[in-house]
Image (cartoon, rainbow, N blue to C red):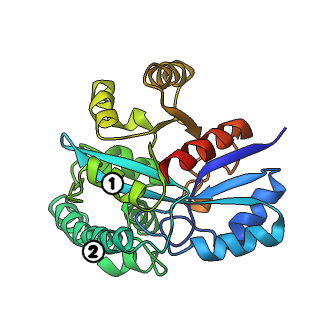
Amino acid sequence: MKFADLHTHTLFSDGTYTPEALVEKAGKAGLSCISVADHDTAAGIGRAMAAAEGAGIELIPGIEMTAEYCGREVHMLGYFIDSRNKALNENLTLLRERRVERIYKMLEKLKGMGIKLKAEAIFDLAVYGTIGRLHVARALVSQGFVSSTSEAFNRIIGDDCPAYVLGFKLLPQEAVKLIRGAGGIPVLAHPFTLRDDSLIGGLIKCGVMGLEVYYPEHTCAQRDKYIKIAQQNNLLLTGGSDFHGDAKPKSELGSCKIPYDLVEKLKTARGSNL
């Protein structure tokens, strides 16, 4: 039986693996198919596809776009995107610029908490691409302010924590439009992070075509609930490990995978979307 992991990251966003190393690890994990879905960038897709072709692994070009909805940060996965699409890349450039602005705002909040973290400590960890909170968490660990990235998120930079900043200025319907305009399938990532399932209905109305129901941090009850929501709304089911390499060691590649027939359903939906 073939399996896929449709949520992975490389060092082009906040992962620690090169696209080539990620593909090699996927082969060793026995995966037949993976998707590189870096945060607000498609820069690593070309290298990942070349490596996957040589390794005999199917690579689905993906993206994880960051939007805002009802005061919440919403992550929108896009599968089978054309990574060269002009409109998509123009907006990804804007999102990356806003991410940089966000870091400086977070640094000010950290300073107000008595945590004097230099910008270089964060930016030096994001040499290749999109900067994000995981880089901040890693910098906080390396500078001795916290013992782990989990502690950094739980106590300092996670949603609703003292140093959290929301500032992406992209609506979910805009993310959906960009993903579909690039030939992709928009899927709501890890819905449990919304912390309010009543918001899912509104996001479905924005044009979401699938839910990431299989996710390492979903409980069995949450998984079953999201499967039911997806079935009731004729949505696709997806899933993956959210692999970031050494930056999130608990989320091992392939630790959360899906049967290949769900990939086939994504392909069918893509055909009707073109």
Residue 215 seen anywhere in this rendered image of the structure: no
Q: Amino acid at mark 1?
A: Lys
Rendered location of residue 16, percent (x, y)? 58, 68
Q: Quadrant of the N terminus?
A: top right
The vertical placement of 92 against 200, above or below, is below
Splitting the image into 4 quarters, where does residue 224 fall?
top right
Q: Which mark is residue 258?
A: none
- Between 135 and 130, the one lying in front of the other is 130
Residue 53 seen anywhere in this rendered image of the structure: yes
- Between 232 and 249, the one lying in front of the other is 232
Instruction: Name the residue beneath numbered marker 2.
Output: 97
Seen in the image, is 178 located left or right of residue 150?
left
Q: Which mark is residue 177?
A: 1
Rendered location of residue 205, percent (x, y)? 29, 34
Splitting the image into 4 quarters, where does residue 27 fall?
bottom right
What residue do we see at 37% from left, 68% from top?
88
Seen in the image, is 223 located left or right of residue 201?
right
Q: Amino acid at mark 2?
A: Glu
Rendered location of residue 38, percent (x, y)? 50, 63
Tell which tag, 1 or 2, sits nearer the viewer.
1
